[in-house]
Image (spheres, rainbow, N blue to C red):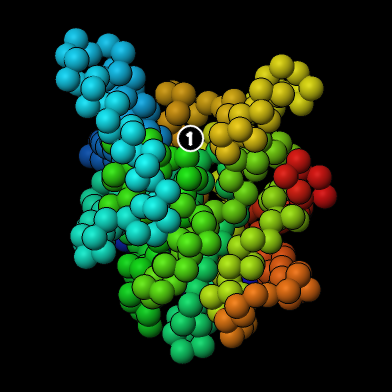
Amino acid sequence: MSEPLASVESPLLLDWFPKGTTQLDIAGLGKDGEKFSTSATTSAALKVRLHRIATFCGMILGFPIYWILASISLTVYCLFFSTYWTTKLGMIFYIAFIYFDGPQRIQGTGYDQRLTNFVTLANKRFAIWKICMAYYPMRIYKTSEEVEDAEKHPRLMFVTHPHGVFGIATQGNLGTFGSGVDRLFPKRPDLPERMRLMALETLLYLPFVREYFLLGGIYSPSRASFRRIFARGEFPVLNLGGAAESLVYQENNELKVILKNRKGFVKVALENGASLVPCIAFEENQAFHVFRPNPNSFVGKMQKTMQKTFKFGLPLFYGNLLPFHPRRHPQPLYIGAPLAPEAPIESPTQAQIDEKHTQYVRALQKLFDEYKAHAGHPDWVLKITDDQGRE
């Protein structure tokens, strides 16, 4: 079993507890969890309860799915239930604006770059993320110093697996400073500030919440977006698998990732001379309980139809108390070593794409094999599948 070089986590309220205590312990999931949960000391027990209540409530305020639901609800209200015709008309004009404005804005142009950079950095530093990351809790592990070598790897593309239902480990660990990624790369301190999440394009067309996403430096995973991001000296973070992977059933002793026929990200990396950085979130699929319907049933067919039509899946899942509230389950993310960089290739051949794809799969497999025991799953097997979950 390999040991990571360094790790960080949310510092939320850790100074309340004895030195060496982790968020995992306070959540009742670590080696000292039982001690904190059943502490005879009234003050310690109260601190634990306050910590858990604060993180649970913080998730309601900070978890993006609630913003998306609020955005959809507000849109429906304005269109169909508002008693003011001006509200309905304004909503119609806003939707029309999104329809015509979206294709350009979501591909890396966004708002004014100075404004976007300011809001993105402010959002990453927002205190609510430390509360949210302490809920699970989340932790990031650095397994190689190479990612900090700016001369050898001036351009990086972080590719994370698996996607799960919402890709929470990627969003939380790399999209914010809540779990301490800003402290993980001392030799390259600007790296976390320049990370940019790539999101499902459909989300960037939702009224209201799209403005937050665009101002927060979140873009669609299009070739144009990648080109603009690299040109600005930023680093895209791609949670591969997406809608298709959220519908792939995971067995207890395996981790399935849709990668077999996903080569577009490799082509983009070759075109821009970027080094691919494999990342694994071993517990992503444990964030929710997912129900697997029969693929030939009405529900199974409906899920596939929605995936093909709207480009997002509709898995049947439930979490912790509230349907969309994720379970309190550790969410570690392991950042691997970047692949050897290549000079930009304007039009890479299929052979070049296939070769780099093979190198990436090997690097991902190596990262998985070296750290699965550290993550607590020594018997797990990594399975590379197509969009239907077939090897």
Task: Between residue 114 and residue 128, name the one nearer to us.
Answer: 114
Q: Give residue 67's position: percent from left, percent from top.
A: 33, 34
Residue 50: percent from the left, percent from the top? 26, 36
**Which of these two is toward me, 214 or 189?**
214
Residue 261, position as x, y percentages in the image: 74, 55
The answer to whether residue 187 of the structure is visible from this angle is yes
Relative depth, front residue between 251 and 220: 220
| Residue receiving disc 1 | 327
Residue at point 78%, 73% (across, down): 351
**Crowd tier of the residue under label 1, counting other residues whose Cα lies within 10 Å: few below 14, some 14–19, many 20 or above:** some
Q: Residue furthest right?
A: 391
Task: Point out the image quarter for the N terminus.
Answer: bottom right
Q: Amino acid at mark 1?
A: Arg
Question: Where 196 sits versus 34, above or below?
Answer: below
Q: Residue at x 54, y 75 (%)?
A: 272
Residue 176 falls left or right of residue 258: left
Where disc 1 sits, the SS reads: loop
Which residue reaches farthest bottom? 151
